[in-house]
Amino acid sequence: MSILRGALQAYAQSFRPMGVYQIRNVKNGKILVLGSMDLTGARNRLSFMQQSNLNSIHELQSDWKIYGGDSFVFEELDLIKPREETMNDSSELNEYQQEVDALLELWIEKLEPFGDKGYNKPKRK
């Protein structure tokens, strides 16, 4: 196995920071609460959208046009600590995804980012 291939495999099996975050509009205080298995990637996505002035997050579209991308900030709300340094199989990945989803649900219940308070859509019952 080449050194590059080994490094790529090690990266793929490593855990990146995962958890729940919000994108907050500093002009009106509205928030969008989301979960991610890769918080660094989520932060980089927002940064790229700001630099290119392109928005791919549908919920933010109208306020993005009004206030501009610089009006939005990325804030981590909760991190999940991996139990080990590397992931051994896909069932482990599924367990972490379930943890992220459960944590996201708790934060949405707590912050209620709907209507005038946020960009999330209430769950249909």
Image (tube, rainbow, N blue to C red):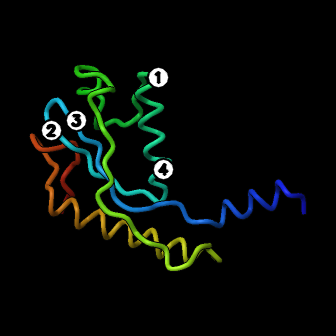
Label 3, secondary structure: give it. strand
Q: Residues within 10 Å of mark 4 (few under 14, many from 20)?
A: few
Between the C-alphas of marks 4 and 2, the distance is 23 Å
N-terminal label among 4 and 2: 2
Q: Residues within 10 Å of mark 1 (few under 14, many from 20)?
A: few
Q: Amino acid at mark 1?
A: Ser
The label on residue 25 is: 3
Label 1, secondary structure: give it. helix
User: Horizontal and vertical percent for residue 22?
Assistant: 29, 49
**CB atoms of marks 1 and 3 within 8 Å:** no
Q: Is residue 22 left or right of residue 100?
A: left
Between the C-alphas of marks 1 and 3, the distance is 18 Å
Q: Residue at x 53, y 60 (%)?
A: 16
Q: Is residue 5 left or right of residue 43?
A: right
Q: Amino acid at mark 4?
A: Thr
Residue annotated with mark 2: 29
Between the C-alphas of marks 3 and 4, the distance is 19 Å
Between the C-alphas of marks 3 and 2, the distance is 5 Å
Find the residue positioned furthest to the left: 116
Q: Residues within 10 Å of mark 2 (few under 14, many from 20)?
A: few
